Image (cartoon, rainbow, N blue to C red):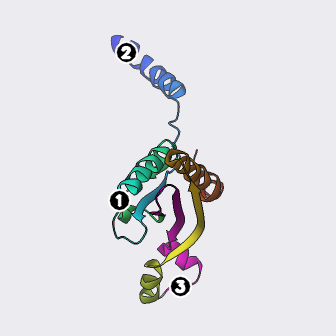
Amino acid sequence: MSYTRAVKPIPIVVALLMATASPKAQTPEKIRVVVEVRSEGQASRDDVAARLLTAVRGGLQAMSDLEIVPRDLARRIIWIVVGRTPGSYAASVMVTERYDRETLMVLGIEDDDMAGRMMALQIVNDHQIFTGRDLAALARRIVTSVDEGVLAKLRALTPKKK
């Protein structure tokens, strides 16, 4: 008698748990980018370029669907070359993207040697030049332009996972 009383509630409890358990929504995949900043005519960055990099990274990191990652983990690179003219700020911003193997297969490139060479290339998606007297304002304009330009197009292409 006690066995029957213990067994009957188990399926009811399991059914209740399954009914109340909400499925976990998958978060959409983040857009991965690398940010490279250099000073004009140099292989490294000076103080102005370092400050611009910090400001641009801060603006990009505030975006919930974007992740700044090391170069080997990203298809997209935001290249910034900072001018060195005293008294004003200038930045050339270029957003590039690498081919991935899946895209090349869709394009009909199945040869591994050719695919390897093409995946080493960078495709320019956007190029703009910004100038101004305020470095923080310049950084905000760069972030806004990338967000409303290339990233907005990527968001429109990326299917939302449910």
Q: Is residue 86 magenta?
A: yes
Residue underneath mark 1? 46
Residue type marked 2: Ala
Residue type marked 3: Ile
Residue underneath mark 3? 109
Q: Which residue is at 54% across, 26% downward? A: 19
Magenta-colored span: 81-110
Q: Which residue is at 34% across, 11% downward? A: 2
Q: Is residue 157 left or right of residue 118?
A: right
For this rendering, which residue is in front, 95 or 26? 95
Bin the neighbour count of mark 1 within 10 Å (Cα to Cα): few under 14, some 14-19, many 20 and up.
some
Q: Assign a secondary structure to mark 1.
A: loop
Q: Which residue is at 53% across, 60% downward? A: 90
Which part of the image, by quadrant, shows the N terminus? Answer: top left
Observer able to see residue 159: no
Residue 138: which numbered mark, if any? none
State yes or no: discs 3 and 1 in contact (Cβ < 8 Å).
no
Q: x%, y% of residue 154? A: 60, 58
Q: Between disc 1 and disc 2, whose residue precedes? A: 2
